[in-house]
Image (spheres, coloured by chain):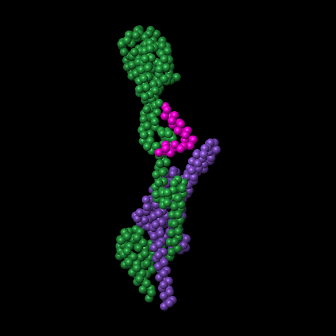
Chain colours: A purple, B green
């Protein structure tokens, strides 16, 4: 499933809404502040497209809420903001160490064969990769089973794609505009200097 | 019938009856294969036969205790043919004949003709076996592929094969697991879960470019992780680029886009913002991009024409 134009439009509207919240704050003149503002509003816009149905969207909103609570509250409708800004239980992390230790103990007692070792190594590799995926996807640590993880990844990738597409188009337009202004300003200056 | 003539009630009643039945029970044990150890005598074992057959047997083997027990078990009144004084226990041969007949009948039913608890249990057990077999039929088509894959199994899985085959050797268990398949519900649930995961991995492979040709879960996951990371980095780069563009553009962008989204279909917006040159171009290119991305492509050449026209105008303006 590729990003649809309706998704792009919705994202754009929400992103603008977020950016307008920043507009009265004229003191974010430094580049880094502006970048942060842009990125946060874009993230919240992307997450709010899903309206709290997916795990990654909730986790992303929580993450941005830690950086700018006000923005999140303004961007989302009031009801959701209260429910979404809650603490979650990172229960999966605790269990994994215990499980790993017990598995190591068990492994010493087992006898192995060649085929078994290969299969076990493959399984270990896959588990490492899924752990890596959990680190990348927001809220991955809270997804208890692999099925959920893969579903969330699918949705997350599609949403990221829309975000990137819309942002790229705007950036290209803005840069083209600025280039054009730079070009024309340069031409003007040249003309003035010449003439 | 001949048999009725032979029956004579015993004066002793119960105990002798049981002794005789004890003797007969040994013979019965030969004929009927299984005899549970916990039964007191073969007679009670006889009683645990299916009630109709027990009644048939007992009608001809009438003794007071037997008749009373039969009545208690089956709820059928013993035939009033015999008086208590004249009833005797039938001979061994008769009982053996009966036992043989019952054993053959049991075999026809497809069950082991066990006396004791097997008949009653078998009727109970056929029900779950049948449901499992139906499940097995449903799963068999899915499991066929897995069983082929599992033919190249490790030793651990071969042990599971053996245990599953042993389960199949029991007489009243229908075939529900193929070679390489464990029979418990845990593995069935695992199998369903694995199929779900595989289906979703396929969707992911289609989404991420370049994942179709990769084989193996680990490499596909690697690609997915790389793709997600690259998308995230792109978002950061784009936000940096946007921030580094003139700040005023940012806010003009907002207003322009806000107003523009209100009038997305209007081509007349192109004509209105003529006054100031510079935000104008932003408007203008904005619109062109938006029309390209979000709307019908029909307006794009129109915008392109306008763009060129304005560009020329401004060129002339600035040039002079």
Q: How many marks?
A: 0
Q: Residue at x 57, y 41 (%)?
A: B155
Q: Quadrant of the N terminus of chain B?
A: top left
Asked whether B166 falls inside the magenta stretch, the response is: yes
Across and down, in percent, residue A65 comes to 52, 62
- Secondary structure mostly taken by the magenta-highlighted segment of the chain: helix
Across and down, in percent, residue A25 comes to 50, 72
Q: Which residue is the extreme one toward the bottom? A: A195
Q: Residue at x 37, y 17 (%)?
A: B77
Q: Nearer the viewer, residue B106 or B314?
A: B106
Q: What range is drawn magenta here?
A: B145-170
Q: Is residue B18 visible?
A: no
Q: Nearer the viewer, residue B46 or B142?
A: B142
Q: Residue at x 41, y 27 (%)?
A: B109
Q: Is residue A22 visible?
A: yes
Q: Quadrant of residue B128?
A: top left
Q: Residue at x 53, y 62 (%)?
A: B229
Q: Quadrant of residue B106?
A: top left
Q: Nearer the viewer, residue A173 or B194?
A: B194
| Residue A66 drawn above or below residue A146 | below
Asked whether B113 falls inside the magenta stretch, the response is: no
Q: Nearer the viewer, residue A121 or A69?
A: A121
Q: Quadrant of the C terminus of chain B?
A: bottom left
Across and down, in percent, residue A179 comes to 48, 78
| Residue B123 drawn above or below residue A167 | above
Drawn side of residue B101 relative to residue B35, left or right: left
| Residue B170 drawn above or below residue A122 | above
Across and down, in percent, residue B230 comes to 53, 63
């Amino acid at each position: 499933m590729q990003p649809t134009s309706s998704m792009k439009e919705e994202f754009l509207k929400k992103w603008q809404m977020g950016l307008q919240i920043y507009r009265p704050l004229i003191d974010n003149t430094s580049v880094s502040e502006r970048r942060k503002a842009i990125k946060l509003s874009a993230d919240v816009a992307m997450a709010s497209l899903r309206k709290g149905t997916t795990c990654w969207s909730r986790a992303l909103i929580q993450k941005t809420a830690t950086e700018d609570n006000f923005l999140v509250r303004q961007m989302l409708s009031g009801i959701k903001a209260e429910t979404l800004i809650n603490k979650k239980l990172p229960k999966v992390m605790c269990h994994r160490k215990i499980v790993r230790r017990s598995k190591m103990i068990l492994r010493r007692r087992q006898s192995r064969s060649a085929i078994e070792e290969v299969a076990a190594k493959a399984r270990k590799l896959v588990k490492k990769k899924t752990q890596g995926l959990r680190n990348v996807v927001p809220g991955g640590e809270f997804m208890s089973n692999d099925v959920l993880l893969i579903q969330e990844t699918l949705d997350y990738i599609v949403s990221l794609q829309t975000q990137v597409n819309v942002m790229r188009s705007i950036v290209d337009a803005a840069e083209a505009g600025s280039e054009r202004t730079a070009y024309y300003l340069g031409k003007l200056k040249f003309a003035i200097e010449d003439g | 019938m001949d048999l009725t003539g032979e029956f004579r009630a015993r004066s002793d009643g119960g105990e002798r009856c049981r002794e005789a039945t004890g003797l007969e029970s040994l013979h019965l044990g030969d004929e009927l294969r299984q005899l549970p150890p916990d039964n007191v005598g073969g007679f009670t074992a006889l009683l645990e036969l299916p009630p109709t057959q027990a009644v048939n047997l007992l009608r001809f083997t009438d003794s007071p205790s037997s008749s009373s027990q039969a009545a208690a078990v089956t709820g059928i009144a013993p035939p009033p043919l015999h008086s208590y004084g004249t009833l005797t226990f039938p001979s061994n041969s008769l009982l053996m004949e009966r036992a043989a007949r019952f054993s053959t009948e049991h075999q026809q039913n497809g069950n082991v003709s066990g006396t004791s608890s097997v008949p009653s249990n078998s009727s109970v057990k056929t029900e779950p076996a049948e449901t499992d077999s139906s499940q097995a039929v449903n799963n068999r088509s899915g499991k066929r592929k897995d069983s082929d894959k599992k033919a190249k199994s490790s030793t651990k899985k071969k042990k599971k094969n053996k245990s599953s085959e042993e389960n199949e050797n029991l007489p009243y268990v229908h075939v529900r697991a193929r070679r390489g398949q464990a029979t418990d519900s845990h593995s069935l649930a695992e199998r369903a879960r694995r199929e779900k995961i595989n289906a979703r991995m396929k969707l992911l492979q289609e989404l991420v470019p370049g994942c179709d040709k990769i084989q193996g879960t680990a490499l596909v996951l690697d690609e997915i992780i790389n793709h997600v990371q690259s998308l995230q980095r792109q978002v950061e780069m784009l936000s940096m680029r946007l921030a580094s563009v003139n700040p005023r553009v940012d806010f003009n962008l907002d207003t322009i886009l806000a107003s523009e989204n209100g009038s997305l279909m209007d081509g007349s917006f192109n004509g209105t913002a003529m006054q100031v040159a510079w935000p104008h171009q932003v408007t203008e290119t904005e619109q062109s991009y938006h029309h390209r991305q979000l709307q019908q492509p029909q307006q794009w050449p129109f915008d392109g024409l306008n763009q060129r026209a304005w560009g020329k105008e401004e060129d002339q303006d600035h040039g002079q």
